[in-house]
Amino acid sequence: MKKILSMLLCLMLLASAAMAETVLDGGESRNIQIDKADVNDEIEGISPVTGRVLADVAASAPDAGFAGQAITGRYMPILVQIDNADGGIGYDGNKATYNRAPWGVQYTDVIYETPLYKQGNTRLTFLYSDLMPDEVGPCRSARLFHAWLREEWDCGFSFYGKQEYTETNVPEVFKTTGADKKADGMLLFGGTDGSSRPWKQYYGVYEKMQMKAPHNRTVNVAALSTLIPYSFEAANHTWLFTDELPEEGDDAEVIYVNWAKGGDLKMYNSILEWDEDDECYYRYMMGPDDKEHVYKSLRTSGDEEIPFNNIIVQFTEMDWVLTDAPKPTVLGTGNADYFMGGKHMAGVWNRDELSDRTVFYDENGEEIRLQPGRTLIIVMDYQTENRSVSYE
């Protein structure tokens, strides 16, 4: 009898351990020797950003008002700064109406989530390449990281305002890198620039949702793309892809991304859940009033869920000049963790120059191969208090 009880106890402990939550260590030494990757060759007919068949993407596009490589055949991504107030599910004085969900999100290829305030607020950056819609928002302001991100992609950039502190001066980055002069000055689309700018006509107020300024600014990304001269070519940012789901790594059915410990800021904390049938992760937010899984996190206004085929956590050190002035480390090497196919894998990222792309490597030091589809990149300042990423 005692032997049976002991066996049952062992099985219970094993089951408990199997479901135990694993916290990622953003600063641990991983001792991965990387085989530095060069740029990858584009494959004709395949998106360099999502790995999808461009003809299939074009077939799924609405009839009018769209641009992008799948429509025009031209590779020219555009980054757009996006509001993430209250985790993108917030409300303007009415807790029964969650009306800050971004629009145009269903056409994104890559989404970056980056720290905005030291207390836990974050901002999103949408990257459009395959398809570019005629309405995207809420368009918001740029920080230092976002200006450096534009250098990596060397593409169009849409933002509504920019930080100009001494040590986190976005216009200074544009000037120093020469981004303000590239493509005849048709890469940096500032929504608060003077009315004489040719792109100003493509910014407006989004009327379909009852949102107050500054959470209601919309931008026609498809129209912006037509302003970039055809003589200008964006940087080759082609990723590697595989159709095979990963077999290596440990199981990761639920991912917890924590930016803040409690209070209203916990609304920025997200949960990503693996859906075995759809073979993707779906993202949910904590929400107000201690509600879990408020289903307005990166969904369309029609409540369509947005799938993520790749989750990348890019750990970085952060110098907070002020509580709203992040100055991250984006050059060098740091830890990176990947979630694909319901699995977790550890690796590192590397970027030597601002004009280089950030390359993500696996535990063997080889460039990671992503799943075709949408990628979420979470840039996590792991040294800041109350930040953590874990999974089970």
Image (cartoon, rainbow, N blue to C red):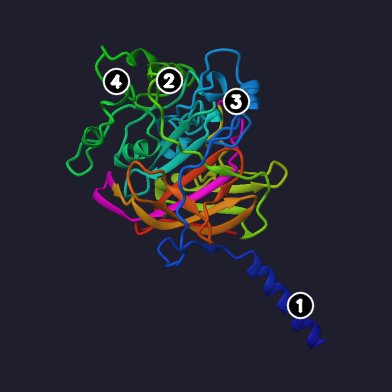
Distance in Å between CA atoms under marks 4 and 3: 39 Å
> Of the residues under marks 4 and 2, which one precedes in the sequence?
4
- Name the mark nearer the viewer: 1 or 2: 2
Q: Is residue 308 magenta-colored?
A: yes
Residue 373 in the image: state x and y as whole percent: 60, 38
Q: Which mark is residue 225?
A: 2
> Of the residues under marks 1 and 2, which one precedes in the sequence?
1
Question: In the rendered image of this protein, does residue 23 appear above or below residue 159?
Answer: below
The answer to whether the residues at label 2 and label 3 have Cβ atoms under 8 Å apart is: no
Q: Which mark is residue 267?
A: none
Distance in Å between CA atoms under marks 2 and 3: 26 Å
Q: Is residue 260 visible?
A: no
Q: Which mark is residue 8?
A: 1
> Of the residues under marks 1 and 3, which one precedes in the sequence?
1
> Of the residues under marks 4 and 3, which one precedes in the sequence?
4
Residue with the mark numbered 3: 302
Q: Residue at x 53, y 61 (%)?
A: 363
Q: Is residue 296 left or right of residue 87?
A: right
